[in-house]
């Protein structure tokens, strides 16, 4: 495989990973909300829960994605396996 194909496959895999993490975190947060928080709050405030869960699941997926990407960057030499997306990087 060449660098361009590696880059495309990495971007597709990272996108799928990010979406899966968002779905898993949404389900977990919704279960926690339904089990522990929903019985406590009054009915007039219950509708805001799903909106907050959606925003929190997106935030969790971004943080997990960034952590995993930073770990992969530290472990592998990116320039060896991947083609630059926006041209060559300038080195001083």
Image (tube, grey):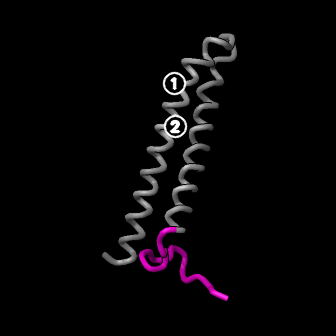
Q: Height in image: 23 above or below 75? A: above
**Residue with the mark numbered 2:** 25
Residues under numbered marks 1 and 2 in contact, where contact means CB atoms less than 8 Å apart: no
Residue 69 within the magenta-colored segment of the rendering: no
**Residue with the mark numbered 1:** 31
Q: Residue at x 49, y 68 (%)?
A: 75
Image quarter in which the C terminus is found: bottom right
User: Which of the two residues, 87 or 72, is positioned nearer the viewer here?
Assistant: 72
Q: Residue furthest left?
A: 1
Q: Which residues are magenta?
A: 75-92
Q: CA gap, disc 1 to disc 2?
A: 10 Å
Q: Residue 12 vs residue 54: left or right? A: left
Label count reads 2
Helix, strand or loop under label 1? helix
Q: Residues within 10 Å of mark 2 (few under 14, many from 20)?
A: many
> Picture coordinates of residue 24 (x, y %)?
47, 37
User: Which of the two residues, 10 or 87, is positioned nearer the viewer here?
Assistant: 10
Q: Residue at x 57, y 55 (%)?
A: 67
> Picture coordinates of residue 16 (x, y %)?
42, 51
Q: Earlier in the sequence, mark 1 or mark 2?
A: 2
Helix, strand or loop under label 2? helix
Q: Residue at x 54, y 80 (%)?
A: 87
> Picture coordinates of residue 70 (x, y %)?
56, 62
> Picture coordinates of residue 79 (x, y %)?
48, 79
Magenta stretch prevailing secondary structure: loop
Residue 82 within the magenta-colored segment of the rendering: yes
């Amino acid at each position: 495989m060449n660098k361009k194909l590696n880059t495309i496959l990495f971007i597709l895999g990272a996108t799928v990973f990010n979406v899966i993490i968002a779905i898993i975190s949404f389900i977990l947060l919704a279960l926690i909300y339904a089990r522990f928080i929903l019985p406590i709050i009054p009915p007039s405030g219950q509708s805001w829960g799903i909106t907050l869960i959606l925003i929190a699941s997106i935030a969790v997926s971004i943080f997990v994605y960034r952590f995993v990407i930073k770990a992969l960057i530290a472990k592998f030499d990116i320039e060896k396996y991947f083609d630059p997306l926006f041209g060559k990087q300038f080195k001083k």
